[in-house]
Image (cartoon, rainbow, N blue to C red):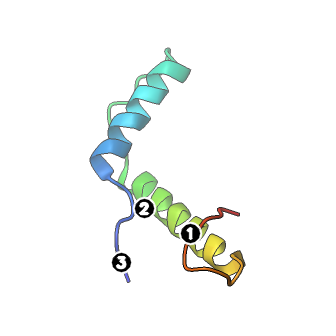
Amino acid sequence: MKTDLINVAHVKKYARLRAEEMRPEWAPSQISQQFLDDLNTKVRLLIDGAIAHHPTIGKTIKFLF
């Protein structure tokens, strides 16, 4: 299943903004596809981990482990 879990346009905008705020001497103008793919994978793994370790009570996912 290959589904993007991130909003690519927002991630690109945020990454450039934070780079400017955190490292004013460095001004990246592009965000690589590898960065976006890695971030998407990390989000997927975070969700999978939360579900795997979530208590099996109720019908709402509440906790992020």
Nearest to the eye among marks 2 and 1: give it: 1
Left/right placement of residue 53 relative to residue 35 reads right
The residue under the point 49% across, 15% down is 24
For label 2, the crowd category at 10 Å Cα-Cα, with few meaning under 14, some 14 to 19 and many 20 or more, is few
Label 3 sits on what residue type?
Lys
- Percent across and percent down for residue 50 are 64, 70
Q: In whole angstroms, how far apart are the C-alphas of marks 2 and 1?
A: 16 Å
**Residue furthest front as drawn:** 58
The residue nearer to you, when weighing 57 against 7, is 57
- Percent across and percent down for residue 31 are 36, 43
Contact (Cβ within 8 Å) of mark 2 with mark 1: no
Secondary element at image label 2: helix
Mark 3 or mark 1: name the one nearer the start of the chain. Answer: 3
**Residue furthest left as drawn:** 9
Secondary element at image label 3: loop
Contact (Cβ within 8 Å) of mark 3 with mark 1: no
The residue under the point 38% across, 83% down is 1
- Percent across and percent down for residue 13 are 33, 36
- Label ID, residue 37: 2
Q: In whole angstroms, how far apart are the C-alphas of marks 3 and 1?
A: 15 Å
Label 2 sits on what residue type?
Asp
Q: Is residue 44 above or below residue 24?
A: below
Q: Which residue is mark 3?
A: 2
- Label ID, residue 25: none
Q: Which residue is mark 1?
A: 47
The residue under the point 52% across, 62% down is 43
The quarter of the image holding the C terminus is bottom right
Q: In whole angstroms, how far apart are the C-alphas of marks 2 and 3?
A: 11 Å
Secondary element at image label 1: helix
